Each structure stands twice: as C-alpha cells, then as structure tokens.
C-alpha cells in the first residue's frame, strides 16, 4: 500500500487499522490525519509508542478532557506543549497557568521537524526552557482575542 492509496480511503475502520498497526509510519500518519473518531484519536494520542504519531493525533483532537490527559501524561514535553496549544477550555488553561514548577522543563534543541508549534526551536542548538504555563497564557490570550 502507498500513501496515494491511503488518501483514497474513506472507511474509518480501515483507516483506524492502518493508523494503529501499519509498519510504515508515513501511512500511519496519513491515516491519523483522516481519522474523525475522537475516541480513536485520543487512544493514539495517549498510547501510541511513537511520539510523532501521538503528535499528529493530538493535533486532530478536539476532546478537551483527552487533551488535558495528554498534557498531563505524555512523556514528551513537546507533545504536552502541542496539547496545550489545541485546548479551547479556558478553565483547563487557567489550571495550567496557576500550576507550579512541574510545568517548567529544559528542552534540548534537536528539533528537526515542522516548527509551526515551536518556532523558538528552529536553531537546533543548546537548550530551551519550555514553561507550559506560558504556553497556556498565550493560548488563553489568543482565545480571548488579546
């Protein structure tokens, strides 16, 4: 199967199977991008062994409870940051803003992918302090039109 084949698939059950089990990660990404089930996307966002598959699933999630779980549980700090940027529930964002130092992390700048969500990591050198509270502040301001 090729990416062109996956692009033609509309059957969600078939897409789900590809997203969960295919050996080709590019096919899995394509399938994830076409999934509509919030339950399946949440399961992938929370449990897939590959961080970049989780990331694609996170970007498709609109389920606020699932995004909050990802933000709290994902081992990858950048995926946690992405989850915050996808949140629209202002109460959840306020909880993060009022949180403690557990939301502050040192991140090595070895980022090689799409810098849409992390423009400050484009230089790929040294370390970066990522404060998820600040990400939540920015997202809340964006939602409030400030």
Image: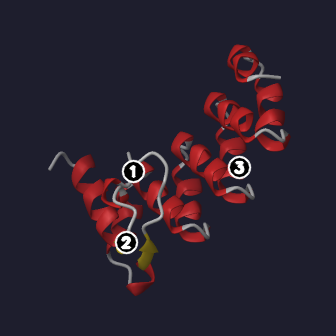
Out of 132 and 28, give the one closest to the viewer.
28
Estimate the x, y position of residue 95 in percent, counting from the top left. Answer: 39, 71
Estimate the x, y position of residue 48 in percent, counting from the top left. Answer: 73, 55
Out of 124 and 66, give the one closest to the viewer.
124
Query: What is the CA distance from the residue labelled 2 to the residue labelled 1?
Result: 12 Å
Query: What is the CA distance from the residue labelled 1 to the residue labelled 3?
Result: 20 Å
Q: Which residue in the structure is indicated by mark 1?
A: 117
The residue depicted at 67 percent of the width and 36 percent of the height is 32
> Which element type, helix, strand or loop, lies under badge 2?
strand
Q: Which residue in the structure is indicated by mark 3?
A: 44
Neighbour class for label 2 at 10 Å: few (<14), some, many (≥20)? some
- Residue 20, quarter of picture: top right
Q: Looking at this rendering, what residue extends furthest in the left direction?
A: 146
Instruction: Give whichever of discs 2 and 3 has the lower sequence position.
Output: 3
Q: Which residue in the structure is indicated by mark 2?
A: 130
Relative to 66, 102 lies left or right = left
Task: Identify whether 143 is placed above or below 123.
Answer: above
Query: What is the CA distance from the residue labelled 2 to the residue labelled 3?
Result: 24 Å
Of marks 1 and 3, the one in the foreground: 1
> Which element type, helix, strand or loop, lies under badge 1?
loop
The residue depicted at 33 percent of the width and 63 percent of the height is 135
Task: Identify whether 26 is placed above or below 103.
Answer: above
The residue depicted at 76 percent of the width and 38 percent of the height is 19
- Which quarter of the rendered picture does the N terminus lie within? top right
């Amino acid at each position: 199967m090729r990416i062109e084949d996956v692009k033609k698939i509309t059957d969600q059950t078939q897409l789900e199977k590809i997203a969960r089990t295919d050996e080709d990660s590019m096919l899995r990404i394509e399938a994830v991008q076409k999934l509509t089930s919030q339950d399946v996307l949440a399961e992938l966002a929370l449990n897939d062994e590959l961080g970049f598959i989780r990331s694609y699933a996170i970007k498709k999630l609109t389920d606020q409870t699932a995004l909050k779980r990802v933000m709290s549980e994902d081992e990858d700090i950048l995926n946690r940051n992405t989850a915050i940027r996808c949140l629209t529930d202002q109460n959840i964002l306020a909880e993060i803003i009022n949180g403690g130092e557990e939301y502050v992390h040192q991140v090595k700048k070895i980022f090689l992918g799409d810098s849409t969500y992390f423009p400050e990591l484009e230089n790929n050198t040294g370390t970066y302090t990522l404060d998820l509270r600040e990400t939540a502040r920015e997202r809340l301001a964006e939602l409030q039109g400030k």
